[in-house]
Amino acid sequence: MLHALLDAWRACRDARIAALIEASDARVAPLLAPLDTRAGELAYHEAWVRLASAERALDVPRLLPGLFRRPLGQHFVRRVEQIAERPDDPRIAAALAQMVLEPPATSRSIWYAWHVIIERLVAISDPSTVAPLRARLAEPKGESLFWPMLYEKIEQALAALPGEPPPLSSAARAALDEATSALAAMPAARADELAAPAAAPASDLDALLAAVYADPASDEARRVYADALSERGDPHAELIQLQLAPPSAEAEARAEALLAEHGERWLGPLRAALEPSETRFERGFLARCEVGFGADSARDELLAERGWSTVSELYSDDPAVLRSAAFRGLHTIGGFEAALLAELATADPPLDVATLAAVRLESLPHEGLAGLRTSTFSGLPAVRVLQLVGIDYYDSRQINALLDSLSGLELVRRLERLEVSVPAYDGAPSASALFAALPGLRLLTVHPDFYYCVTLVRADDGSVGLRVVQLIAPFRDARDDADMLAASLVAHLATRPDWLALDYAGEPRPADEIDPHYDRIVEVLRARRDLAPLRGLPLTLPRDDPQPWARHLGSWSSEDDRRKRQKRLARARARARRG
């Protein structure tokens, strides 16, 4: 009946047929569940898009309220575009005209949606939309630039819209009377005839989850699983959709709220082995974690869980964990002492990881590293990034000796990036010689202090840059910071850099605090005679964060920190056992 009425209305745009369509909707609406307005913005939008994609005429009343769903941003634009692609429909015309009469949003970022709305009203050519458009013109304009644009569009639309529908023929009037009687006599539809496809059964959900674990790199497998969860109203669907979407502050805040409420449940039994402060979800699943077990039996039992498959970044000093096949999605491992490198260097089967992060140096000079000079590192064939972290302060000569010795390791000769975070108490170690000895190295970073780091950068054209990054907010006089940075620059002048950059990667600060500070540093550096070789170099202040490890530098900074972390992990395990 609904399709027949819509066909009849498209033939003559008569208001009486539109009224019959509304009457038909009134009979069906109670049988169709509305979209869940309690869902987060992204989850609601995804559900709206899926419903609209089914292209069922009876779903239009469920879709139209979503056009007004706040916040009105790019999701609003996408929904307007999708509703405008549907066939001519008096219900859609009425909803779009109502939006023009009472605009729900006027920001410039969504002006495009208003162009789509007016163009669609003209294309539908429903005479009943003329009255609300004229009513809008009778209202005074607002103060923003939106209103002149809208009123101009309305005037253009009114010039193109018909004032009255064509008259009905006698045959059409007879058909309309017959349709009215048929609709009144029609038996009520059953909900099972109108409902959307049923939610996936639990067995299907398990199969979809198994597909995620089988191919943790696939975003598509996660989207399909999220769609199935969404049909069941599971909030995990929203987290997956949020973290697969382009990042935004709103999405991040919503994801944090979901994890605060449901995160432990989604971790399941894995949480007994996790350090909470080092647990992170990405793309809807556990991605980063620090793992430790109180007993081998607990380890063996928990490593049988499928949930480890999505972990890409793993921190542990347990070789059985690091070599476990349960972590099939790994690209980064770390959190262990350098002595363990000897065991991992010959792992069989080899570990398919690209990054060794936070590998701790217990002492300098390090005999364990020296003992690896003859190793081919067959167990770590894919490693291209290495971070070495000292847990104490050392004489800068010891650190320079460490840097000089690293070029003798086969693992280091294969690297594209090397970071050495070993603080010195008496000067600025130089990485120049090591950088020159490793022509395949693209980035070499030295943290001579917890306040700043120095990175040597080799570009595709062979040019070399020197970037100094301040890791904490300025708290001293700019001259003191300049002297500290100058000492490091002097130590690296042997590289003969082609460009120099000063950067800030600490806690966010207002530009009016950071900019004058760095202007003063630049002034001081340019006046120092010992930096004469840098005269004439391009100097930039990029204000970005090129050091992804800077955020984690404190994780393994001291033996005291390590003991505190072990205690926190033990408490977390105890809470998990009690819960």
Image (cartoon, rainbow, N blue to C red):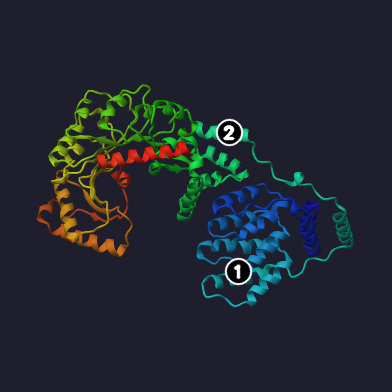
- Residue 553 circle label: none
Side (left or right) of 465 relative to 132: left
Q: Is residue 466 visible?
A: no
Type of amino acid under label 2: Asp
- Residue at image mark 1: 153
| Closer to us: 239 or 266 | 266
| Residue 562 vertical position relative to residue 27 in the rendered view, above or below | above
Residue at horizontal 19 percent and vertical 34 percent from the top:
363
Picture quadrant of residue 354: top left
Picture quadrant of residue 389: top left
The residue most toward the front is 578
Residue at horizontal 63 percent and vertical 52 percent from the top:
36
The residue most toward the top is 348
Percent coordinates x, y for residue 369 in the rendering: 22, 29
**Sooner in the amino-acid sequence: mark 1 or mark 2:** 1
| Closer to us: 89 or 410 | 410
Q: Secondary structure at mark 2?
A: helix
| Closer to us: 245 or 572 | 572
- Residue at image mark 2: 206
Type of amino acid under label 1: Lys
